[in-house]
Image: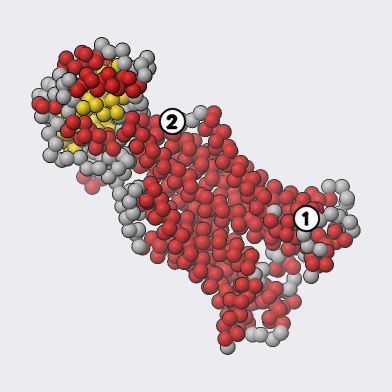
Amino acid sequence: MSNSAGFPVNDLLRRKTQTGLTVTTLTLSVASTLFLLQFSSRLGLGLTSQTSTLTLGLTAVLGQFLLFTGVLIFIIGAVLTSISVFLMMSQRTRDFALIKAVGCPNSLVGGYFMTELLTVTLVSTILGIVFGFLADFVVAVLVFSSYILPILWYPILIFFTFFVLAFLFGLQPILKAAQLSALEALSPVTYFGLTEEAKHKPLSRRALTWRIALRSLYRRQTATVRIIFLLSTVFILLTVSVAGGIIAGDTSISSIEKPIGRDTLAIGQVAMINQFKLELEKFSQKTHENSDFNYSNQQYAIPYTLIEQLQTLNSVALVDPRLVLHEEVAEQPSIALGSSTADTYDVGGYRKGQSIVIGIDPALCSGSWTIKGRFLENNAITEAVVGDSIAETMYVPNFKEGINISDPLLEGISIANGDFKIVGVVVDPINNGFVTYVQIDGLQRATGIYHNNLLIVKLSNSTGRDIAINEIETAAREYGLAVYDLNLSVEKNAAFLSSTWQTIMFLPSAILASAAICLVAYMMLSVNEQLQEFAIIRAIGAKPNIIVSISAIQSCIVLLSSSGIGLSFGTIITFIILIANPVFTPLTILVISGWILAALIAMFFLSLYPAFRASKKSILEIMI
């Protein structure tokens, strides 16, 4: 009885390579899917949000990528699971037949292989959950600098989903084998999945290697089509994650750097500088500004004599005086015309929210923005530009409140006692995008606060940076003001966003490894199916490396077909659907090409492993 119970385990251990490939493939599929869900939730993008980071505009871009990537990862995981388990259990058909031939009943034989299937599936899914948690922990510590307990129903959902998929796909060949006679099950057509019986037609010596390779691919049409479909989907994922990740990362990093700019300093009272720094670094850190901070306090006023003094310095390229306030803002709806002048409809409602409001002089503004619409114009004191997070909260349709149409560029915003027409929507890291820009004169009239409380100074290229900062600090110190290098906050925000995109690019690595392992399993099946032919060719004088040559041709055909399909669709999806106004350079294209080419070459050489093993065997060993 103990021998009967131990037979399935001993049989799996006897086939270490095949068992290891299957377990590794399933483990990586489960781990990558679980990690994706956990990572999305930490960014506030998953089914359940654990944090609130980034601006809502950038969150939408990340959300598109993660949603599309997640769908592809799940599809690839399901296909990988089906192919791996199907290949493993299909090749057990011969064993099934041999055991039946010696008189073992179908029920007992089925029980053996069912136990093997359950063991492989259970071990793989458990290992996948463990490695998924480990990857989530490492990324949480490195990217978010903290670890929040994961959502427990995610692993339960992933475990049961992949367990059921693997079991169902593995059960199919077992049930099929149970219906076959021992003679049918021993046929190569059955256990190698050939389209037809091998017909030993004479092959001309011309292009013999190519003919053998192509004939073998044709004889395994079902397996070949499955592996090409799988790899095509993998290369779509690879293109979207690598190309899209690099380009979207550069684009989004540029969008959060431009509003502050490089080589800029902030000058103000120490408390004001600290508060502005907190508002700026909310994007990359869990900082909470002092909600009782009084921005309008007269003690934070910047002396005009300092502004005039800074404007005379050769080290200063631009002085940007600002009035920064924290205000309640209100949506100002409008009425739009329909197809005719008699046809009108309401746009927006009367929603309210909180915003950092910044009054600036457009002619002296030191920053630039990624913008929908346009920025403020000189002397347009009744215009406003809102951050993307305000646009995504206060200016979106809400059918429960009866707001069917809402568009910030068709509406306005009320600040204190002033009404402003919205002319643009910008991506801005300040207060995580809950920011509003208006002309400083208009803000002063609306609030009755007629002083500046913050200076943004842009450094000149004509003077060394350290010398310029020392000169500006000396001037500010005479008025009891502090100077803060905004590069420090810009670099923190850029580093956080960069690490986020790099993590997204890392997501396909486990799937890519799984696909490579699945390709190795497919090539192993191909080599085993051709062993008889290889022995005959070797016997008539062919060198052992002909096995590697034939396998290399087959692998090239499969990989080039898959990569052609995957790269084409992946490029279209990346540039047309996922990224608007992409920022990239020729170097970016070279980096993307290098990553994809490296993945393609690595998969090619890994796929030749079964052929190298077979080429080292003697003719007698091949025939056995």
The residue carrying mark 1 is: 547
Q: Is residue 7 above or below residue 269?
A: below
Residue 167: % across, % down:
53, 69
Task: Find residue 148 and report its image quarter.
Answer: bottom left
Residue 341: % across, % down:
26, 26
Q: Nearer the viewer, residue 474 or 194?
A: 474
Q: Is residue 360 among what the camera can see? A: no
Which marked residue is nearer to the observer: mark 2 or mark 1?
1
Q: Are marks 2 and 1 in contact (CB under 8 Å)?
A: no
Q: Earlier in the sequence, mark 2 or mark 1?
A: 1
Residue depicted at x 17% and y 28%:
269
For the residue labelled by badge 1, is the local secondary structure a helix, a strand or a loop? helix
Q: CA distance from mark 2 to mark 1?
A: 49 Å
Residue depicted at x 23% and y 30%:
436
Q: Nearer the viewer, residue 27 or 568?
A: 27
Q: Residues within 10 Å of mark 1 (few under 14, many from 20)?
A: many
Q: Is residue 94 left or right of residue 462?
A: right
Q: Which mark is residue 581?
A: 2
Q: Nearer the viewer, residue 524 or 190?
A: 524
